[in-house]
Amino acid sequence: MEKRELTCIGCPMGCQLTVTMDGGEVTEVTGNTCQKGDIYARKEVVNPTRIVTSTIRITGGDKERISVKTASDIPKDKIFDVMKDIDAAVVAAPAHIGDVLVKNVAGTGVDVIATRNVEIA
Amino acid sequence: MKTYDIVIVGGGPAGLAAAVAAKEAGNDSILILERDHELGGILNQCIHNGFGLHTFKEELTGPEYAYRFIKQVLDLGIEYKLNTMVMDIAADKTVTAMNREDGMFQIPAKAVILAMGCRERPRGALNIPGYRPAGIFSAGTAQRLVNIEGYMPGREVVILGSGDIGLIMARRMTLEGAKVKVVAELMPYSGGLKRNIVQCLDDYKIPLKLSHTVVDIEGKEHVTAVTIAEVGPDRKPIPGTEERYTCDTLLLSCGLIPENELSRSAGVKMSPVTSGPIVNESLETNIPGVFACGNVLHVHDLVDYVSEEAKRAGQNAVKYINSGCKEGSNEEVIEIVATEGARYTVPSTIDLGRMDDLLTVRFRVGDVYKNSFVSVYFDDERVFHNQKRIMAPGEMEQIILRKSQLEEHDGLKKITVKIEKE
Amino acid sequence: MLDVIVIGAGVSGCAVARELSRYDINVCVLEKCSDVCEGTSKANSAIVHAGFDAAEGSLMAKLNVEGNEMMDQLSKDLDIPFKRNGSMVVCVHKEELDGLKVLYERGVKNGVKGLKLLSKEEALELEPNLSDNVEGALLAPTGGIICPFELNIAMAENANVNGVEFRLNTEVEDIKKDADGIWHVRANNGEYKARYIVNAAGVYADKIHNMVSADKMHIIERRGDYCLLDKEVGSYVSHTIFPQPTKYGKGVLVTPTVHGNLLVGPTAIDIEKKEGNNTTQEGLDAVISKASENVKNLPMRNVITSFAGLRAHLERHEFVIEEVKDAPCFIDVAGIESPGLSASPAIGKMVGDMLKEKMGLKEKAGWISTRKGVKSTEGLSIEEMNALIKENPAYGNIICRCEMVTEGEILDAIHRPLGARTLDGVKRRTRAGMGRCQAGFCSPRTMEILHRELDLPYEKITKSGGKSNIVIERTKGEESEA
């Protein structure tokens, strides 16, 4: 039996949740005051994921950085691996919203895509 | 210089949404004046996600959200001028602006939409003692340096203020390799979203110290250390609770102030609570034909609400022009009063003759309220009483008024919004 | 070899330098900071005192009154804003009314013109926001307000145009005289030789003096905390409102500034620390509580910044402007605390006259007496603005939106004699960053201009020289240019 403490992000209540786990399975969520807390806790303890947003170097454009995001959630424990790839990447202008700038970032199977347009200077 | 029916001051989310709505409402003579070199306003530097859940039912980053509106402005052929500073708005709605190419010019407008946004409270306004070295930034300035210019202000960071910008910057600086040592918050609660506290601080094990403030800044040339201390209920530092953090950067995220210098000089009446214009149901100020929306009206926490509000301002500006620039209807004006926990409402008056079928009234509470009721009184009669599990100053609240309901209430003069325990 | 080295580019040093620039000699100003006006001259009340406060017969009183009288012409010559808004000393305790009379009489003896004692009613009529407890006031119509940065910078620029060399980032470490009577000044960046030295080193004047004299000097750093309020409340009072003076000085005043802000301060705290210009909570609290004794309901929610300055106080509370007895050809300009800013033109003249006589100086031909300031766009008509923008489109580009400063003004500030090299340098010459957002919006844009115009990498752009860089490196581990 393992217990994990979490803060629910569903609303400003910020309920302190206690999740009881047994062999990787959630057996109980307590402390929540609504269903949102239960759903959040079950996902967060088993498979926490995040969207990572940052910038990438871009050359030849009217900006020197282009804002980017992971096209979908990546595992939370991969955030810094993802950042390493993002920091190392250099792309050439132009680039537009949705363009894939890094494929399969940090082996997550998720691409990093542009979130703004940068035109050729 | 060409003349325009509607001049929109500001090309951020509010100005863009107002322009699109005005165009869609049938007006073809619209000009947006933007002081920056691109449209989109502050959203361009808000590269994190979480925008647009209400408007687009998906999570976008700031630049993506802005571009949804920029694209509409471009597709609709709405005119705009970049790098253009509005210097003055006269009470007769003549807008004086300036840029490199056109020089200084004046546009006599039929309607003006104020959409200038807000600015951050600087260190001076917080009266933080200590030296005044380099390395102290408002969080938004640091955000621009990191996200747009691509420069790091420092490596070891202390943040004062747990508003969303401060929290977001804690994560941004961390991801860019800096060490964020602590976030101090003067109030006993954070002004930021719970999601941001968890995903920007907890994820990176950055401590949040509530009821704390900065009591000293060290470093003659550059910040070398910051001392924070706990504050009592009077928000004054408690001697003996000081903790010193060596650092090279202090970020301040201590509140936003609507930028109303232009509005004031035009003669627009201001609310001392919001520092924004006092507006009626049409989001129109005391000067007929001058409308306000977005953060210049009152500071929002969700851009979706800004867009929605700005849309109404744009539509109402067109209605005003189509009515032959008529001042109000002949109906009695109903006053909306915020009291007992509710700090203000936007709008603060209703002209029943001009009211839409539904009217969203937004307000903020002054404290954290759990299991309390939002109550609305029509004169002395309570007509709405709705329990909320939690209300906090950081989250805007809203009620929706139905025109038919107001009409049924004969001789209605005053609507009161308050928070009640039961 | 130089004829004269002036140590310190504050308002005294620059006033001396400007006076010496009239003569056919080589003059060099050594300044340890990265710009002129970086010490006491940058953080004070920005007042041109009438001169009723200084002790009768003192050099302070004499130079104050003289400096005050010179200010009209000087401000015209140097193109700097100066306004005689009048000073008012307010009495809020009936039993202290006699004190006003003492001040009045002293002022008359000091040669201050137009002094007038006011009744409670007269005072309140002139200044409705005075405390309800006001019992009477002394009005000094010759009191004025000035921009200390612009005065200091203008004198430096004018001196520079007339041939005075300025060595910034130059800190004096030792001074020796050789057998031929030549001064050898060792600085962090080399040695400078001269026949005469003027010590105008502000709070460091004792350190410099003690390098050459056995008769040791001790400067006490007397800190003053201030709060600066938004222009929105800049006309809360129109005169400079003083309390009655105490042994610690003129007390906490409330005054409009010449640029339209409201300034409240200073405290007077002896700290004995040459770089101790940090504000403290007690200091800021004291500013507010003391100012509130004389002016009611001060709109302190409109504070946009607070700061502290150091007065170079000598125990005897008197200006020391004289040749050092055991160090001939070394002239002290020390103990220049309030009313030093007011007196500065007279201090410059006094030292200039001293050296003229001692060195037998001759005025050179072609001395330029005037200087044009950074062209301000404030208050220009549309036609005037458009003429300016047509000539130089940079005047159409607003960089600082709080103070409405254009790119044209910033370029002017950078490319003029002794031009701005730092954010503070730009700020003090143009007011960009001086407004209500305190450079939040304009600092990245001003940095972009400094980067472009001076070919300075971003990481080398500083707030005010030294280690005060704004950013430390590029993101993404990118190598920076040059």
Image (cartoon, coloured by chain):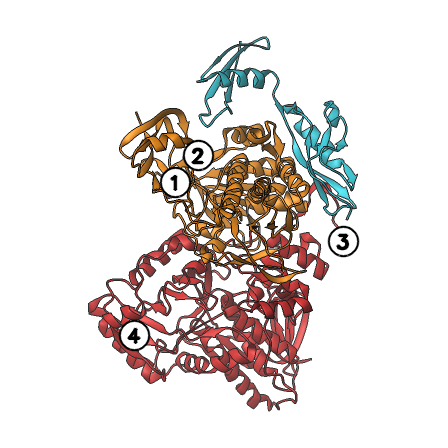
Q: Amino acid at mark 3?
A: Ala
A74 on left or right of C289:
right
Q: Are marks 3 and 4 on the same chain?
A: yes
Real-space CA distance between mark 3 and mark 1, rounded to the nearest whole angstrom: 62 Å
Residue that mark 4 sits on: C138
Is label 4 or label 1 in front? 1
Q: Amino acid at mark 2?
A: Leu
Colour of chain C in the image:
red
Kindly check if marks 3 and 1 are in contact, taking CB atoms under 8 A apart as contact: no
Residue that mark 3 sits on: C482
At horizontal 46% and vertical 25% (from top left) the residue drawn is A14
Q: Amino acid at mark 4?
A: Leu
Kindly check if marks 2 and 4 are in contact, taking CB atoms under 8 A apart as contact: no
**Tag count:** 4
**Mark 3 vs 4, N-terminal side:** 4
The x, y position of residue A38, in whole percent, is: 51, 15
Mark linked to residue B350: 1
Chain identifier for the cyan-coloured part of the image: A
Above-or-below relation of B40 to A110: below
Residue that mark 2 sits on: B359
Kindly check if marks 3 and 2 are in contact, taking CB atoms under 8 A apart as contact: no
Real-space CA distance between mark 1 and mark 2, rounded to the nearest whole angstrom: 9 Å
Which type of secondary structure does the marked residue at label 3 adopt? loop
Q: Nearer the viewer, residue B382 or C319?
A: B382
Kindly check if marks 1 and 2 are in contact, taking CB atoms under 8 A apart as contact: yes
Q: Nearer the viewer, residue B127 or B221?
A: B127
Kindly check if marks 4 and 1 are in contact, taking CB atoms under 8 A apart as contact: no
Q: Nearer the viewer, residue C40 or B390?
A: B390
Colour of chain B in the image:
orange
